[in-house]
Image: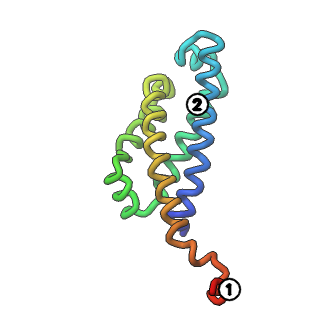
Amino acid sequence: MKRNIDILREMEKEITAFQYTDDEIYLILEAEECDFCKLYDDGDSKVEEIKEHIFKIENLLGELTEDFLNIMGYEKFDIESYKWCVGKIRYSDYEIVNYFSSFTDMIASLEYIVRENIRGYKLLTQVAYDSGDNNAER
């Protein structure tokens, strides 16, 4: 069984990858002066890539313990809404057009929670990484 912190580290990488792909999509939209619907209709690979990141994040959320998921809920991330939106695009691929901006907002919120928890973990465990030589400081 993976620890929550290990899952959060994987999630942080996936969130970063999502954001890079999101930036690339917006650059394409600006350069080609089109909208996301046209990008989807053209079968652009970035649309498929963004969906892969969304699905991977959902899988990682499913690996977290229930108590940690509750904490995320208290920190204003609605996991059920995220999973509902993922279900919509799994059922009908075209729904990515409708929920793309929602995913961008939800993942931005998730990013803050993930990074804060990783930062807190580092702060709590930094003593374990010290050399243990207390006499050197004296």
Q: Residue at x 43, y 43 (%)?
A: 109
For residue 136, the mark is 1
Q: Nearer the viewer, residue 60 or 121?
A: 121
Q: Residue 51 location in percent, x, y?
A: 56, 35
Q: Residue 80 location in percent, x, y?
A: 35, 45
Mark-to-mark CA distance, 1 and 2: 49 Å
Asked whether disc 1 touches disc 2, contact meaning CB atoms under 8 Å apart, the reply is no
Three-letter code, disc 2? Asp
- Specify whether 111 is left or right of 74: right
Label 2 packing within 10 angstroms: few (<14), some (14-19), many (20+): some
Three-letter code, disc 1? Ala
Question: Is disc 1 placed on a helix, strand or loop?
Answer: helix
Q: Residue at x 61, y 31 (%)?
A: 48
- Where residue 138 sits, quadrant-wise, is bottom right
Residue 7 sits above or below residue 19 on the image: below
Q: Find the residue positioned furthest to the bottom.
A: 135
Q: Nearer the viewer, residue 131 or 8?
A: 131
Q: Which residue is mark 2?
A: 22
Question: Is disc 2 placed on a helix, strand or loop?
Answer: helix
Q: Residue 34 location in percent, x, y?
A: 57, 11
Q: Find the residue positioned furthest to the top.
A: 33
- Specify whether 138 is left or right of 91: right
Q: Residue 7 location in percent, x, y?
A: 54, 59
Quadrant of the rendering where the N terminus is positioned? bottom right
- Where residue 98 sits, quadrant-wise, is top left
